[in-house]
Amino acid sequence: MSAFDNALRQLSRAQAVFPFEESFIEKLKTPNHIHEKNVMIDRDDGSKMDIEVYRVQHNNARGPYKGGIRFHQQTDLQEVKALALWMAIKTAVVNIPMGGGKGGATVDPKTLSKTELERLSRAWVRAFVDEIGPQKDVPAPDVNTTPQIMDWMTDEYQKLTGDKTGATFTGKSVAHGGSLGRDRATALGGWFVFETLAQRLGLLGSIKVVIQGFGNAGATAAKIWSEHGHKIIAVSDSRGGIVNEGGLDIKAVEAWKEKTGKAEGFPGSRAVSNEALLELPCDLLIPAALENQILEHNALQIGAKVILELANGPTSPEADDILFDRGIAVIPDILANAGGVTVSTFEWEQNLKGEKWSVEDVESRLKKIMTEQAEDVYRLSQEFGTDLRRAAFVLALRRINEAIK
Ligand code: GLU
């Protein structure tokens, strides 16, 4: 099943809990616009390289399309469509004035030099310049895209259009109009949701945490949870994972990864595959890498008590059912990782108003939103006797439906 199939099934599963009109759900199964192009970039050696680039604009009933751009070798249109649908749901779950969209490029950015990456970033903007803008569609970082890339994109957009607001892209560096706190926002938002729900989901005191993925979301989560006295017993990157049941020193793991390029081989740890890592006994499992990790075939082996999804789409609907039957709560992506787009929206607002908010201000606003929406999602799950994902979908769909009407 592709990620998009999963996203469509999640919509239908929400409808089984709450009887939305068929025509409304049908409308949300198709994106408003799909833009797919081929760009050619110059390689440093003088050769040319063809790259597929995408922007999918799913729904803008609640505000401009909003969502990141992913550079990954496995990215394709189906994946971007799924991610765009999830963005439309996510922005509604946290009730920020945005719709949902997503972009991408099918490329392994690790094979590009810095100048090639800059050319690709600028070419992406030239491909979609007419489709984006502060009141139209506001892209941001996602897997493998960084503040530096957002700065190049903003610069290219300004050159092409004369825009002075800088509000077309979020996740920029602070020096170029980015918001304080955006770098930590995805993981910190997840932390606020965890703090709100942990006790009710049976997690008390210091807990054992396993994290899959050591990009912006995963590495920052490792730091935040360990700063709060929890034990990170395993982490991984795309090459594989490391385990130490006694707890990993996260700052030292970061330094090791910086030096060697991978987590593997970290002194005092043993190696574990990304698959096996998901099955380690622990209190909290945080998938923070890619979609389709927890599936029908391994859901029975998951060793965690609670799952908090910082990745988009890591759990399939079949796995959701198995985990629900096993009493393992899944705090879904559309709530758990919504801190990123929330602070992106703060960035957009600051750019449009010409303001600069302090990090304390950003984080206290983020906390308020994440806490309130986590409460709402939990309450609905109790009311409908369903899992947190379906409850979050119902909450979001009601808001989108109201906006459409
Ligand atoms: N890529 C992030 C996500 O999946 C952030 C999107 C944004 O900041 O617009 O939510």
Image (cartoon, rainbow, N blue to C red):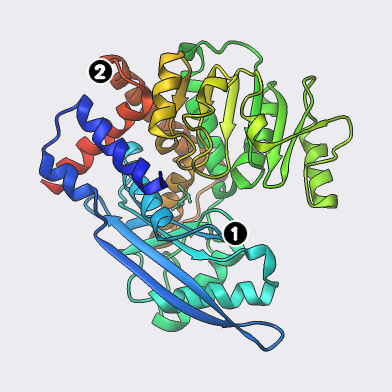
Question: Count of labels shown?
Answer: 2
Left or right side of 238 for 157: left
**Residue 224 in the image, given as x and y percentages of width and height:** 65, 32
Categorize mark 1 by other alpha carbons within 10 Å: few (<14), some (14-19), many (20+).
some
For the residue labelled by badge 1, is the local secondary structure a helix, a strand or a loop?
loop
Residue furthest toward the right?
267
Left or right side of 209 for 296: left
Q: Is the residue 300 above or below the residue 142 in the image?
A: above
Relative to the observer, which residue lies in front, 402 or 34?
Answer: 34
Residue furthest toward the front?
297
Left or right side of 9 for 319: right
**Which of the 4 quarters of the picture holds residue 248?**
top right
Please name the residue shown 45% across and 12% down the image: 200
Please name the residue shown 21% across and 43% down the image: 400
- The residue labelled by disc 1 is 146
Q: Can residue 371 be seen in this view?
A: no
Relative to the observer, which residue lies in front, 272 or 35?
Answer: 272
Please name the residue shown 50% across and 55% down the image: 356
Relative to the observer, which residue lies in front, 78 or 119?
Answer: 78
Categorize mark 2 by other alpha carbons within 10 Å: few (<14), some (14-19), many (20+).
few
Which circle marks residue 130 in the picture? none
Please name the residue shown 32% across and 51% down the image: 98
Residue type at numbered disc 2: Phe
How far apart are labels 1 and 2 at the CA level?
A: 39 Å
- The residue labelled by disc 2 is 384
**Residue 295 in the image, given as x and y percentages of width and height:** 48, 32
**Residue 367 in the image, given as x and y percentages of width and height:** 47, 32
**Which of the 4 quarters of the picture holds residue 166?**
bottom left
Left or right side of 107 for 25: left
Q: Which quadrant of the rendered structure holds the N terminus?
A: top left
